[in-house]
Image: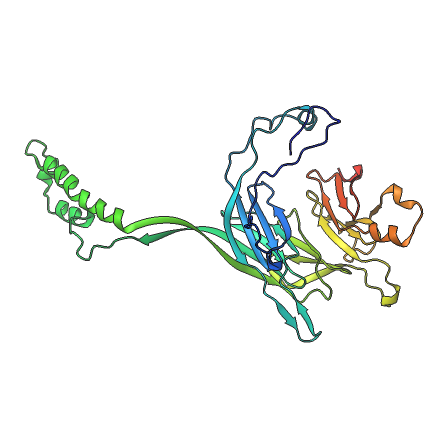
């Protein structure tokens, strides 16, 4: 994106970086279509999920610009300049997160498409990623390993190694160790230099250290949703996360995969009375007890989990003021919110529907 000094001039968008560009005339396979994308909180890593059930991770390699970190938000907005460089990402690793399955009880095929990916807190230098398809959530651990590869091996290695030098030194008597004029110390130094050179040459031929990335599935959270999962969200406490489908929201502990708590249930006793479904859910970035979820009717409900175990009664309901006008079948369809996101400070909520991107402010969340 290029910024212009004239506010009347429209923004000019340009490609900063392109991944997976195909030759002209090559068909795009359905499994290669991107279905979700998520940045890590620091911006150093980018996770991309596709319809083939794969998760690709990119790593940022350029140096961050820290010259303006001391400026306030208002001062940054008043700056009138074009960015001199763009963040550059390079491929790090990829793994097959989900495979196609078949539910024999419901005679339903479960596709491998990744619906959502979320980054968890980094622990001991390892990256943790949550990924989900329609039914199953998985926690992945991504860690770098240093691997030594043998380039050349000498079948008859020289005996002039450190063990040989230590053995020679052990036969030296106390007089030889303290004497400097008789040349023992000089001889020892010369022998050490002479004997270490071949040894170092052998090691340089044998050891070739390379960095590689390994991925491992740590947890599988399954059999908790009757309907398709549309979103997952990490809590700020670093221990829990929520998963949402059309009618229910479940609360999970990252370390417990066989148990979850249903905190929101919108399923009516008679499905004919159903008027709306859940479209997205998101934890507050600061307060671990607050979360928000959106619906197909254009409502955003804020929930405080401290009030009750089952959070069916929302603390606040947010809705665009302009949506109270004339209602029609078309307006009800386009009012459905497809996704919501909190700002970093938690005071604003971004909601996206079929036509608009809206910013809602609630000062009570500050």
Q: Is residue 269 visible?
A: no
Q: Of 229 and 250, which appears nearest the observer?
A: 229
Relative vertical location of residue 86 with respect to residue 92 in this rendering, above or below: above
Give the answer, above or below, for where 181 lies relative to 302.
above
- Where does residue 105 sit, x and y in percent of width and height? 69, 76
Horizontal side of 297 relative to 115 (left or right) equals right
**What sort of colour scheme is used for the picture?**
rainbow
In the image, taking residue 185 as reference, residue 143 lies left or right, namely: right
Which quarter of the rendered picture does the N terminus lie within? Answer: top right
Measuring from the top left, give residue 116's x and y in whole percent.
65, 54
What's the residue at 68%, 43% (across, down)?
285
**Residue furthest front in the image:** 25
Please tell me in which quadrant of the rendered image residue 244 appears: bottom right
Examine the rendered structure and indicate whether residue 327 appears above or below residue 224.
above
The answer to whether residue 185 shows anywhere in this view is yes
* Front one among 99 and 177: 99
Residue 161 vs residue 325: left or right? left
Name which residue lies at 27% across and 51% down. Answer: 206
Residue located at (18% from left, 54% from top):
157
Camera-side residue of 67 and 220: 67
Q: Is residue 158 above or below residue 62?
A: below
Q: Residue furthest right?
A: 326
């Amino acid at each position: 994106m290029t910024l212009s000094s004239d506010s009347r001039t429209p923004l000019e968008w340009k490609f900063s970086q392109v991944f997976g560009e195909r030759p002209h005339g090559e068909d795009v396979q359905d499994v290669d279509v991107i279905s979700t994308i998520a940045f890590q909180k620091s911006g150093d890593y980018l996770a991309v999920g596709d319809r083939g059930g794969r998760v690709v991770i990119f790593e940022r390699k350029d140096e961050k610009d820290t010259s303006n970190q001391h400026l306030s938000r208002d001062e940054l907005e008043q700056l009138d300049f074009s960015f001199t460089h763009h963040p550059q990402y390079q491929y790090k690793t990829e793994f097959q997160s989900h495979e196609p399955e078949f539910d024999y009880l419901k005679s339903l095929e479960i596709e491998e498409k990744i619906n959502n990916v979320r980054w968890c807190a980094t622990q001991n230098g390892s990256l943790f990623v949550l990924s989900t398809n329609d039914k199953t959530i998985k926690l992945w651990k991504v860690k770098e390993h240093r691997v030594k590869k043998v380039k050349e091996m000498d079948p008859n290695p020289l005996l002039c190694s450190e063990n040989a030098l230590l053995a020679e030194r052990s036969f030296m008597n106390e007089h030889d160790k303290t004497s400097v004029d008789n040349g023992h110390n000089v001889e020892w130094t010369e022998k050490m230099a002479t004997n270490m050179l071949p040894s170092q040459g052998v090691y340089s031929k044998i050891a070739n250290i390379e960095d590689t990335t390994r991925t491992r599935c740590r947890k599988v959270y399954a059999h908790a949703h009757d309907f398709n999962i549309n979103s997952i969200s990490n809590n700020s406490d670093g221990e829990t996360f929520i998963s949402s489908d059309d009618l229910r929201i479940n609360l999970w502990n990252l370390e417990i995969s066989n148990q979850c708590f249903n905190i929101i249930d919108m399923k009516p006793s008679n499905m004919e009375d159903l008027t709306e479904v859940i479209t997205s859910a998101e934890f507050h970035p600061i307060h671990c007890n607050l979360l928000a979820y959106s619906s197909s009717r254009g409502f955003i409900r804020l929930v405080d989990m401290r009030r009750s175990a089952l959070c069916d009664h929302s603390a606040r309901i947010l809705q665009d003021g302009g949506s109270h006008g004339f209602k029609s079948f078309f307006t009800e369809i386009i009012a459905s919110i497809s996704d919501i996101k909190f700002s970093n400070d938690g005071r604003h909520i971004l909601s996206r529907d079929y036509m608009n991107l809206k910013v809602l402010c609630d000062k009570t969340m500050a």
